[in-house]
Image (cartoon, helix red, strand yellow):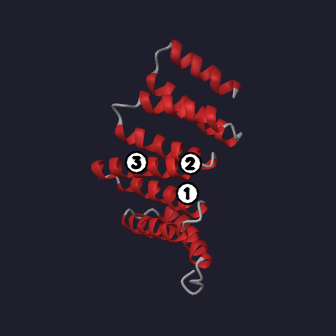
Amino acid sequence: IECLESALELCRVEDDSDGIAVTLSNLGCAHNMMECQQMALEYLDECHELLATQPARQAEVKIKLALTCAANGDSYEAVEHCLACLEVCRSLEDQMLEAACLFALGGIYYDAGEVRQAVEAFERCLVLRRKTRDKIGLAETLNKLGLTYCDIGYDLRA
């Protein structure tokens, strides 16, 4: 955290908006990993505001906000962030980012016990990952989808 806070201070002094955004995002992720979700949300919210003119980067932050909210037990807010992110991804026609958002949404639904909605999100993600030829993302999605299928008794599909 000390390194990241020092980096943020330097970026602010140099008026490096890209560096500030990256560092705020990293601070948000670090605080989330340390289970300090409130601090994580504050950094990610600031980053989101800073990127107001960059919708693709803002969408990436929305995914991080969603995951932080989910870690904080607020699955409703997490889903709302993902749905807002999906709108941006579709307007930008960014299928890679849309797939990442759907993957996060599937995990949030799964953790919230909404397994059928998780399957739907993972299946939509799978289509996009095949379309974009994202082999690593495809494997990641197949793994999550397989476990989710097992959870609802679709053992052969798993």
Q: Which mark is residue 85?
A: 3
Q: Tell me the residue that label 1 is attached to.
A: 108
Left or right of residue 140: residue 100: left
Front in this rendered view, residue 98 or 82? 82
Q: Residue 14 appears at what percent x and percent y?
A: 49, 14
Left or right of residue 29: residue 141: left
Residue 56 sits in which quadrant?
Answer: top left
Residue 33 sits in which quadrant?
Answer: top right
The three-letter code of the residue at mark 2 reads Leu
**The C terminus - image quarter:** bottom right
Q: Residue furthest top?
A: 13
158 in relation to 42, above or below: below
Left or right of residue 40: residue 117: left
Q: Residue 121 appears at what percent x and percent y?
A: 45, 65
**The N terminus - image quarter:** top right
Front in this rendered view, residue 147 or 118? 118
Q: CA distance from mark 1 to mark 2?
A: 7 Å
Left or right of residue 101: residue 3: right
The residue that appears at 64% across and 27% down in the rendered structure is 4
The three-letter code of the residue at mark 1 reads Ile
Q: Residue 62 appears at what percent x and percent y?
A: 46, 43
Q: Which mark is residue 67?
A: 2
